[in-house]
Image (tube, rainbow, N blue to C red):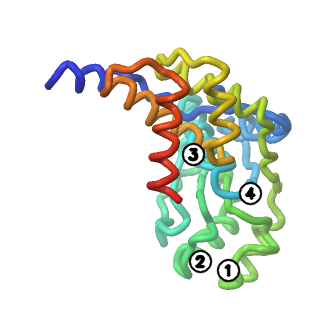
């Protein structure tokens, strides 16, 4: 392994958690999600927001906290939900991107809703739209079940809140970032936070590979490359 590879490998990757999620106007939602990690909670929550809004971050953060509190957790993407998932009593079932569920996954989730109270299950689901606007291929009985859950829309972050999130992400990678760099990124990068963080990651890698400081010219180069690769 070269010194450069070693240097790249020691950069820490920040695990997604509820503690490193920038709350913004989502205070009530975060409190409800924390409560759901309690082994005795049987809440059924549906969380929606557009791609890049932080839904997956929150779901993974809930899963980590629930496991830390000794609650059984089953995490699945909508398209990959098993027909007969193993859900011991008290399990928290988390399903991301329910928009992508096929017929078998929909039947499985419907049955889980019906068995939830008996088995002490909690459900945390996420999608890109409110229940009434989920894809037309969704079973109507399942749509009704989802609509009866606690429904939260993820509120978007302001630029100030995005700047806080970007600085926190940079700090987690050991980056020293001037305010001018973050301001430039917010005004010239994509609007969603995951894309902005991906540019920061690319900036960090490029800085290490080329042994160049974190400067505005370097950020412009990285940002231009990012936009060309992801028009």
Quick one: label 3 or label 2, which is nearer the N terminus?
2
Q: Which mark is residue 138?
A: 1
- Element at badge 2? helix
Say left or right for 160 vs 71. right
Mark 3 closeness class: few <14, some 14–19, many ≥20 residues within 10 Å: some
Quick one: label 4 or label 1, which is nearer the N terminus?
4
Q: Which mark is residue 107?
A: 2
- Element at badge 1? loop
Kindly identify the residue that appears in the image at 68 percent across and 35 percent down. 38
Alpha carbon distance from label 1 to label 2: 10 Å
Quick one: label 1 or label 2, which is nearer the N terminus?
2
Mark 2 closeness class: few <14, some 14–19, many ≥20 residues within 10 Å: some
Q: x, y (%) of residue 205?
A: 38, 30
On the image, numbered disc 3 is attached to which residue?
195
Mark closer to the observer (2, 4): 4
Alpha carbon distance from label 4 to label 1: 16 Å
Mark 1 closeness class: few <14, some 14–19, many ≥20 residues within 10 Å: some
- Element at badge 3? helix
């Amino acid at each position: 392994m070269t010194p450069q590879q070693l240097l790249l490998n020691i950069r820490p990757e920040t695990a997604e958690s509820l503690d490193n999620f920038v709350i913004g106007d989502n205070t009530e939602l975060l409190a409800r999600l924390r409560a759901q990690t309690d082994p005795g909670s049987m809440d059924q929550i549906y969380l929606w927001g557009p791609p890049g809004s932080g839904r997956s971050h929150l779901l993974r953060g809930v899963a980590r906290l629930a496991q830390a509190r000794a609650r059984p957790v089953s995490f699945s993407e909508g398209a990959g939900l098993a027909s007969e998932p193993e859900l011991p009593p008290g399990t928290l079932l988390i399903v991301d991107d329910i928009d992508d569920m096929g017929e078998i996954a929909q039947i499985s989730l419907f049955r889980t809703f019906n068995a939830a109270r008996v088995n002490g299950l909690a459900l945390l689901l996420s999608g890109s739209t409110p229940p009434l606007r989920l894809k037309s291929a969704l079973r109507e009985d399942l749509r009704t079940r989802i609509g009866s859950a606690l429904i939260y829309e993820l509120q978007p972050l302001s630029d100030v809140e995005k700047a806080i999130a970007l600085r926190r992400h940079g700090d987690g990678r050991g980056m020293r970032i001037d305010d001018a760099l973050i301001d430039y990124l917010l005004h010239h990068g994509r609007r969603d936070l995951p894309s902005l963080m991906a540019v920061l990651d690319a900036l960090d890698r490029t800085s290490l590979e080329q042994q160049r400081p974190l400067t505005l010219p370097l950020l412009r180069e990285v940002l231009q490359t990012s936009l060309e690769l992801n028009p």
